[in-house]
Amino acid sequence: MIRYIRRAAALCLVLLVALLVNAARVMLFQADTYDDNPANRRIAITRWGQPRGEIVVDGRPVTGSRDSGQQLRWERTYTQGPLYAPLTGYASQTYGTTLLEGAEDDLLSGTDPMLAPLPLWNDISRGRQAGGDVVTTVRARMQEAAFRGLAGRRGAVAAIEPSSGRILALVSSPSYDPGVLSGTGPEVTEAWRRLNASPNQPMLARAIRQTYPPGSTFKIVTAAAALDAGVVTDPDAPTGIPDPFVLPGTRQVLPNEATGCADASLAYAIQWSCNTVMAGLGVKVGLAGMVEAVESFGFNDSGLRVPSWVAKSNFDTDMSPDQLALSSIGQFDTAATPLQMAMVAAAVANNGEIARPHLVERTTTAGGTLVDSPARHTYRRAMTPSTAVRLQDLMVRAVTEGTGTNAAIPGARVGGKTGTAQHGLGNTGTPYAWFIAWAQAPDSAQPAVAVAVVVEDAEANRTDISGGGNAAPIARAVMEEALRLEAEARGR
C-alpha cells in the first residue's frame, strides 16, 4: 500500500512541476501574446476601468470621463468638442485613439512607466497608475478666434510662437464632437459611419494631416532661396525676367494676375504677387538649389511629430525646368500642410531659424507632479539671418501697400503673403485661399505669432475667393488675440 501511495505522490509531484512550468511559460513568454489577442476582453475592461487623464488648454481640462455603469466603465467626454477635436482627437472604446489621445495614450491611460512610484513597478505589479495629464501649448482665445473665422467653411488654421515653436492654435473646419465615438453600441457605430461618409471629412485634422497646393504663399520660400543663393542681391533692383514669361522648353505662357510684372524687382513681385518673376527666379536658382532650400524649411520630411504625426509637405526632387518654374510658385506637385506654411512664416519672423513645433507644454501625474517638459529644439535653419531680415521687410510691404492689407493691425508690425492656389483638372476647381503672416507688437523684441490660414470653399464663386479677401481677415483675428495675450502677460 505504501508503495502505491509513493507512486501517486510522485505522479502528483510531476504534475505539479508541469503545472508550474506551464504557468511560468505563460507568464514569462506568452503573456504578451495573450494580452494582444483580440478575444481577451480583460485588457479592454482594465483599460477602461479607470478615468483617463486630462488634456488641458489654458489651465482648464477640455476632456473628462463619465461612469457609464457598463463593463467598459469609463467613457471619454469632451468640453467644446468640435473646437478642440483637431488637437485632442478621440479616445473610443470601439475605434481606438487618435491625435493627442493616441500619441499620449500611455500617459493618459496610466500605463506610462514614468507615472510609477518606482522603476519597473508596473512590470512587477502588472498594474497601472491614475492617468496623467497633458498640458498643451494652445491658447484658448486664439483657438476660438480661428474657429469663428472659418465659420464652418472647409479649411484650417495653424499658429506658432516663432521663438519657441509652441503651437498656439490648431483648427480644422468643419469639425465634429469626438464624444459621439467614446462608447460602444449601435449609436457609436452609426456616428462613425456618418462621420466617415461625410464629404466634408470632419474627422480630418486638416492643419497637420492635409496637404494643399500652397500657391503664392510659397513665393516666400523661393525668395529666400534666391537671396541665399545670390541670384538676387538687391530686392529693389529689376530682375530681368520678362512678362510674358514662357515656361522653359515649352510654348506655354505663364500668366500674371498682377500688372507691372515685366522686369519687376523681387520686392514688387512679393508685394503684388508676380508669378513670372518668382517662376523665373526658381529656374535661376536651379533644381538642386531649390530642393536644398525647401528642405531647409521642412518640406519632404516624413518624420515630423508634434507629438502626433504630421503629413509630409512635398516638393519634387526630379523635375524638368518648366515643372520647376511652376513648383517655384507653389503649383505643379508642390503641396504643404497649414502647419508647414506657418513654419515658413515663423522662419522669416525668427531670423531664419525654425524652432521645432510642439503641442505639449508638459505632462504631469494626476496629482500635478511634473513627468516631462520638452526642451526647446531647433528644427531647421531655413535661411541666413540677413535674408530673413530682408524678407521681413518685403512681407511688411505686402501688408502695408500690397495684396495683404486686410491683415494690417493698427500699431503692430505685420508681415504677410497672400496665395490663391489653383487645383483640380485643368485648374477648374475653386482656388484655395491662403494667407501666411506674422505679427510683432511695437514694444516687443520679437514677433508674437506666425500663422497660416487656408480656406477651401466649394460654395464660393471662383472670382470671390482670394487669400487677401478670405484668409487674411482670419489671420488678423488670430494675430490680434496673440498680441492681446502678450500685452496682458507683460502687464501682470
Image (cartoon, grey):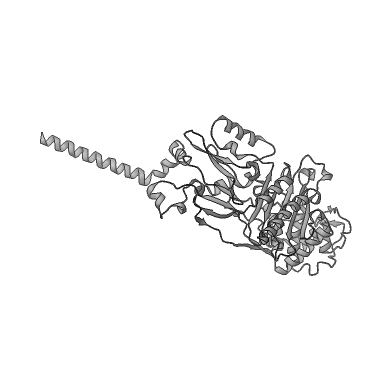
Residue toward you, 38 or 94: 94
The correct choice, above or below, for 231 with respect to 419 in the image is: below
Which quarter of the image is occupied by the N terminus? top left
Question: Residue 325 vs residue 362: left or right?
Answer: right
Q: Quadrant of residue 451?
A: bottom right
Residue toward you, 477 or 322: 477
Residue at 21% over, 40% down: 13
Which quarter of the image is occupied by the C terminus? bottom right
> Number of numbered discs present?
0
Q: Position of residue 264 (x, y in %)?
A: 86, 62
Q: Quadrant of residue 361?
A: bottom right
Question: Residue 242 vs residue 121: left or right?
Answer: right
Residue at 65% over, 39% down: 176
Residue at 49% over, 47% down: 131
Residue that lies at the very extreme toward the left in this rendered image: 1
Q: Position of residue 372 (x, y in %)?
A: 52, 57
Residue that lies at the very extreme toward the right in this rendered image: 260
